[in-house]
Amino acid sequence: MPTVDDILEQVGHFHFFQKQTFFLLALISAAFTPIYVGIVFLGFTPDHRCRSPGVAELSQRCGWSPGEELNYTVPGLGAADGAFVRQCMRYEVDWNQSSLDCVDPLASLAPNRSHLPLGPCQHGWVYDTPGSSIVTEFNLVCARSWMLDLFQSAVNIGFFIGSVGIGYLADRFGRKLCLLVTILINAAAGVLMAVSPNYTWMLIFRLIQGLVSKAGWLIGYILITEFVGLNYRRTVGILYQVAFTVGLLVLAGVAYALPHWRWLQLTVTLPYFCFLLYYWCIPESPRWLISQNKNAKAMRIMEHIAKKNGKSLPASLQSLRAAEDVGEKLNPSFLDLVRTPQIRKHTCILMYNWFTSSVLYQGLIMHLGLAGGDIYLDFFYSALVEFPAAFLIIATIDRVGRRYPWAVSNMVAGAACLASVFVPDDLQGLRIAVACLGRMGITMAYEMVCLVNAELYPTFIRNLGVLVCSSLCDIGGIVTPFLVYRLTAIWLQLPLVVFAVVGLVAGGLVLMLPETKGRALPETIEEAENLQRPRKNREKVIYVHVRKADGPLT
């Protein structure tokens, strides 16, 4: 009996059905962007200072300009280390007293301002921004700044838990069902977050979004790679991630047009309600159905694919089986990821590389320090760097394979981090160029780990394997800010040294994985275990079927 790949040879590897499905799932990839990096705009922290009662009235009475008001009433201006004092402290002065002069009003209270007592902000803050963010609305600054860190940590904690839990459910109950459930929960939680009355409720709904959003993104990735033929699998996998980069560019534009965080959050959430229509547009994965011994349903879906592609199934392809017949329904287990030696090695290396990709990707963004203060343009330009990485993968992956470009990209990222340590501070252009090279390298590594991860596991644990291994990137997302800011306090370049070591080790470990170029997706544990073995040159073997004559030769 034929396999899914055999039937795709007849009905089309990447025809109308696969292109339509890819486009629909790519929209999910783009819509995931605001959840993954939306904190850049939702949690934007503008310059701020303590709100002092009486200052506004005094400024109006004296006719001060904004600069004069700051100079006369805000402590810490001009000091190299005065950011905390300027933003989080205030003069303990009664600004309503009539004895204050309009020219240097504090001179009558003390000959030197440094002798005036300072205290923490007690009446809120004044923010220098025309829009709003969760920082400005809930005052997540100074002593409350840790609450912004908690907000982002909640998303990554949700990513971690959801990747493991929903990954198991998707392999147990199907890709399509779990995809639709994650879309529904994500849409509801996103809207509720946009109308949250306080910080606590906002944090809860953001955690819920984290629980389902990344899992939904990865389920979409698994679905599209299981619908297309072998020759197109790597291309759609890379382009699915390019859709995420497109989402970065769109997010920058939407955030610029909607500078108020509630409207921004609502706008980027509404598309998820449209994704619920996918119930009628996207079928279940036939490969998953076969792994569950539901061959009849899988065959009906293959017939639907053939019809959409304008093809007809030959009579010899009217039944379906896995690459090796499955005797009983296979239920995924976490132990399957470490039970056999080769899959156990793959799991450990993939986990480390997911962690490395996350740490270097986010860490290099923090160290990039693009010139200028326009957050929208900085975000836009940094996203553009990811396109050459994707095209470079497409140009090399079929000619060279997966393993060597992946290993080199990790090593380039690590070497770029190490080189940045020795670039002088006055060569800012060179420093940015090296950082962009590192960003391109780790972007390639990020896209490669997602592609190869799906190719190293058999069908019945493929979704579980991808989601469990990728959960390490969520741990990386949690620890990266601490690596950057804590180590920087010791030595400014110390985080780059750590990133360099981590990246170079990741590149070396990749060389221990098997090459998956030109191989069919493994359907069973045995096939996954045999990936490391060299393939036989089957194309050089000719099988001849000889039919005996019915009667004796004369």
Image (spheres, helix red, strand yellow):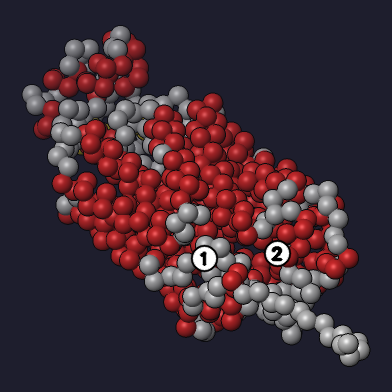
Q: Residue at x 15, y 33 (%)?
A: 426
Q: Position of residue 62 (x, y in %)?
A: 28, 10
Q: Residue at x 76, y 63 (%)?
A: 7
Q: Is residue 505 visible?
A: yes
Where 192 falls versus 354 (above or below)? Answer: above
Q: Residue at x 29, y 61 (%)?
A: 504
Q: Which residue is mark 1?
A: 516
**How packed is label 1: few (under 14 Cα within 10 Å), some, or many (20 or more)?**
some
For the residues bearing labels 2 and 1, Cβ distance under 8 angstroms: no
Q: Is residue 248 left or right of residue 356?
A: right
The numbered dot on residue 5 is: 2
Q: Quadrant of the N terminus?
A: bottom right
Q: Is residue 540 left or right of residue 108?
A: right
The numbered dot on residue 126 is: none
Furthest-left residue in this view: 111
Q: Foreground: 363 or 233?
A: 233
Q: Quadrant of residue 227?
A: bottom right
The kind of secondary structure element at disc 1 is loop
Q: Position of residue 141 (x, y in %)?
A: 36, 42
Q: Foreground: 430 or 183?
A: 430
Q: Amino acid at mark 2?
A: Asp
Q: Amino acid at mark 1?
A: Thr
Furthest-right residue in this view: 551
